Amino acid sequence: MKNVLLIGLGRFGRHTAQKLNELGHQVMAVDQREENTRAVLPYVTTAMIGDSTSPEFLATLGVESYDLCIVAIGDNFQASLETTALLKDAGARFIVSRAARGVQEKLLRNNGADAVVYPEKQLAEWTAICYSSDYILDYIAISDEFTVYEIEPPEKWVGRSLLELNVRRRYQINVIAVKRGGELTLDVDPDAPLSADQTLLVLGRERDVQKILR
């Protein structure tokens, strides 16, 4: 469990608060608007109304005591930038800030953000990748080079085993898990024939995974 300071309670901030609550973390939520703080009360430990661009206000929060600070301000980049810089000056351990454009990401990193999330860009990439293929159900990029995809077995794979297909040597990918009916199996049997009701979690480079799905 972590202690999280969440600043900015628009739609993105509220969804973040809800998920942090589901994960069992303690959340201090902050926004300038009373209606926004009221909306997240069921999901957070404490909520306060305040101006995060005020050093005096931030000083009352004990910023250095939080494991994570999330700047989720989406409608005022100047406020997001100032808040990020002030959190760093106040001794924040780790700051994640929200960006809406590429240039904002660079400025946020230069002003104290340890990590930057770019929801619109990330969702757009996810949508393009998942819905432009008949086989990809989900994916997670784990580095600039490698990605984990959840895919349906291509039709030509059904009824054949991973050993027979020789996927590692032929396609340069690794099948790391198999899922059927919501149940995930990490101990993958290379001799078992693949079926159409399974999905595969495969690790590989995007170009190699895309190649087998064309």
Image (cartoon, helix red, strand yellow):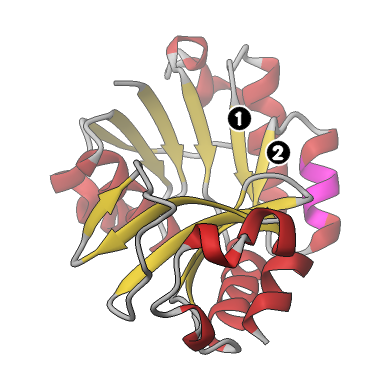
Residue 48 counted in the magenta span: no
Which secondary structure lies at badge 2? helix
Quadrant location, the N terminus: top left
Residue 107 counted in the magenta span: yes
Quadrant location, the C terminus: bottom right
**x 31%, y 56%: residue:** 36
> Crowdedness of circle 2 by 10 Å Cα count: few (<14), some, many (20+)?
some
> Relative to residue 173, is residue 16 drawn left or right?
left
**x 53%, y 85%: residue:** 156
Q: Quadrant of residue 77?
A: bottom right
Give amino acid for label 2. Answer: Glu
Question: Main SS type for the magenta part?
Answer: helix
> Relative to residue 139, is residue 125 drawn left or right?
right
Q: In front: 142, or 153?
A: 153
Q: In front: 14, or 20?
A: 20
Badge 1 is on which residue?
A: 95
Q: In front: 4, or 53?
A: 4
Q: Nearer the viewer, mark 1 or mark 2?
A: 1
Q: Is residue 10 above or below residue 157?
A: above
Which secondary structure lies at badge 1? strand
Q: Is residue 53 above or below residue 90?
A: below
Q: Where in the figure is residue 32, as x and y percent of width and height?
A: 43, 48
Give amino acid for label 1. Answer: Ile
> Relative to residue 196, is residue 172 drawn left or right?
right
Badge 2 is on which residue?
A: 82
Stretch of the chain drawn in magenta: 104-108
**x 27%, y 29%: residue:** 25
Q: In front: 128, or 177?
A: 177
